[in-house]
Image (cartoon, helix red, strand yellow):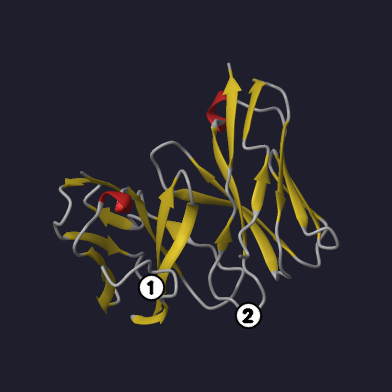
Amino acid sequence: SQQGEEDPQALSIQEGENATMNCSYKTSINNLQWYRQNSGRGLVHLILIRSNEREKHSGRLRVTLDTSKKSSSLLITASRAADTASYFCATDGTGANNLFFGTGTRLTVIP
Amino acid sequence: DAGVIQSPRHEVTEMGQEVTLRCKPISGHDYLFWYRQTMMRGLELLIYFNNNVPIDDSGMPEDRFSAKMPNASFSTLKIQPSEPRDSAVYFCASRKGQGREETQYFGPGTRLLVL
């Protein structure tokens, strides 16, 4: 399976702290995306990083990619209660036209 | 645009009944994906369409599942007969373009409970 795995499965932090989530995958990729899912809602795209990029920023989000280790990390700085959600990484896999989603990290930010 | 629209949002049915889930993709999007999400298996791709044509249905679990896309603005996922293990949240997503960097836009999901 190309499905990625997020680590940790669950993370609980205080508001204002940074949250780091990791994703590992199995096959070569063209890009890796991170999505967010609020409880009872669909997934929302956050950020995409290409296989030839090592780091990317978007607002309070910082994504890194290490293709040699087949891993990525998502850092949310200065977390807010509204960041409480599940976060998924998704890879395309070379030749694939669809995405393969990881198992998700459930983040709880305590006010 | 209203985004991807799914109906119904919740469905409770009894084992053996037919269930039909509906999806309206974002206008202009030429790819449509059906996913199933459960605690045990996470988010699984069931089938996806390009320009209304099914491209990959290898994720469809059994012959009890079928999906159609009669036109660019409507797709259905049907389960007949339904079983309790089909209980899950079913998501529809759409995407514009073939580029692998294109974002998928998800609907709110249909929460299905089969008793």
Labelled pair 2, 1 in contact (Cβ < 8 Å)? no
Packing grade of label 2 (10 A; few <14, some 14-19, many >=20) is few
Give the Cα separation between the discs numbered 2 and 1.
24 Å
Of B25 and B113, the residue lying toward us: B113
Foreground mark, 2 or 1, reads 2
Residue that appears at 47% across and 49% down:
A43
Q: Is residue B51 visible?
A: no
Packing grade of label 1 (10 A; few <14, some 14-19, many >=20) is few
Report the amino acid beneath label 2.
Answer: Gly
In terms of image quadrants, where is residue B47?
Answer: bottom left
| Chain letter behind tag 2 | A
Numbered-mark total = 2
Q: Is residue B34 visible?
A: yes
Query: Residue B69 in the image: x percent, y percent?
Result: 28, 76
Circle 1 — which element? Answer: loop
**Quadrant into which the N terminus of chain B falls:** bottom left
Report the amino acid beneath label 1.
Answer: Gly
In the image, A51: left or right of B2?
Answer: right
The correct choice, above or below, for A95 with respect to B22 in the image is: below
In the image, A102: left or right of B93?
Answer: right
Q: Which residue is mark 2?
A: A95
Discs 2 and 1 carry the same chain letter:
no
**Quadrant into which the C terminus of chain B falls:** top left
| Chain letter behind tag 1 | B
In terms of image quadrants, where is residue A41?
Answer: top left
Q: Which residue is mark 1?
A: B28
Residue that appears at 38% across and 39% down:
A40
The correct choice, above or below, for B40 with respect to B16 in the image is: above
Of B15 and A2, the residue lying toward us: B15
Circle 2 — which element? Answer: loop
